[in-house]
Amino acid sequence: MTRLTKASPTERTAPRFLWLDLTRKCQLGCRHCYNASGPDGRHGTMAREDWICVLDQAADCGVRGVQFIGGEPTMHPHARELVGYALALGLQVEVFSNLVHVTPEWWTLLRREGISLATSYYSDQAAEHDAVTGRRSHHRTRANIEHAVRLGIPLRAGIIASDETQRIGEAQQELQALGVTMISVDRVRPFGRGADGRAPATSGLCGRCGTGRAVVGPDGTVAPCVFSDWMGVGNIRDGSLADILGGVSMAEANARIRSTAKGGACGPDQECTPGFPGSSCNPRN
């Protein structure tokens, strides 16, 4: 296996945010999942040492925040260690979890300074929520939302509207009653299972992918964002993060996105920072 090499100071670019897409493994099989994660998913080919080196390079490049995402990132065997390492580097960290199963060790980690939590919620009614996730998950997610609020963990929740009859307003009201103050509503993005068999296209993107941000996938592929992981611009195990982010392939991908994207939840003056509280971007879905 090719190991990563750290970038030299002259190679550094200035990204602000990095998604670390750890795994395609997830307890759920959400009907709209943008990367088709599920119980049969795998953790990918990135080793623990590869992810550690990505975090080192990210800090060297000037990245301010990272989001651990998947799949369900808490299912990755090295996720807790990687989160702790990112915090030790001084990075702001968000963990995007379905909150179906949270161990005591994870709750301890999530209470540390510099970390926040995000989740998805679909309805105040269990049957409707579970129809989206494909599993009986509503009661667990709801209970863990309540627990996170009680612990004072910064938490944001995203509601994805998949049809006109979905109880979006009621879900918002329930989350507010549970003490969640950061709530956003988004639409289903046309990728993965949400594409209904259509090939991915840049027209489904917001148009701002790749500007000061990028994603590293479970196999090391770097792409402009989690929704455009099919537009790989390099592999982190073959070159430095700075070189990939500042390279020709990333520039070409960005130009293609800007010329064809129809736009989405992110407005022209809104920084796409889904790993920071207050954002309306919901890349988990």
Image (cartoon, grey):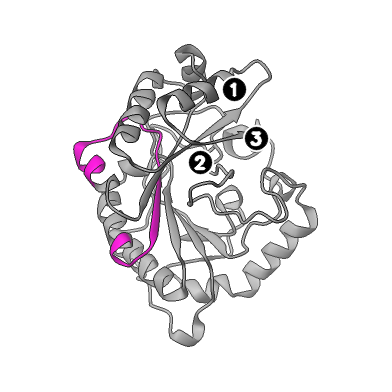
Is residue 239 visible in the rendered image? The answer is no
Q: Earlier in the sequence, mark 2 or mark 3?
A: 3
Name the residue: 55% across, 61% down: 213
Q: Amino acid at mark 3?
A: Ala
CB of mark 1 within 8 Å of CB of mark 3? Answer: no
Name the residue: 20% across, 37% down: 104
Q: Amino acid at mark 1?
A: Ile
Mark identifier at residue 168: 1
**Residue farthest along the bottom direction in this orientation:** 10
Which class describes the residues within 10 Å of circle 2: few (<14), some (14-19), or many (20+)? many
Q: Is residue 178 left or right of residue 192?
A: left
Q: Which quadrant, please, contains the N terminus?
A: bottom left
Q: Amino acid at mark 2?
A: Arg
State which mark lies toward you, 1 or 3: 1
Label 3 SS: helix
Seen from the viewer's position, the closer of residues 276 and 244 is: 276
Q: Earlier in the sequence, mark 1 or mark 3?
A: 1
CA distance separating discs 2 and 3: 15 Å
Seen from the viewer's position, the closer of residues 226 and 43 is: 226
Pointer 2 residue: 284
Which class describes the residues within 10 Å of circle 1: few (<14), some (14-19), or many (20+)? many
Q: Is residue 85 above or below residue 178?
A: below
Q: Earlier in the sequence, mark 1 or mark 2?
A: 1
Is residue 76 visible in the rendered image? The answer is yes
Pointer 3 residue: 195
Q: Is residue 9 left or right of residue 105?
A: right
CA distance separating discs 1 and 2: 17 Å
Label 2 SS: loop
Q: Which residues lie in the magenta part?
A: 87-108
CA distance separating discs 1 and 3: 21 Å
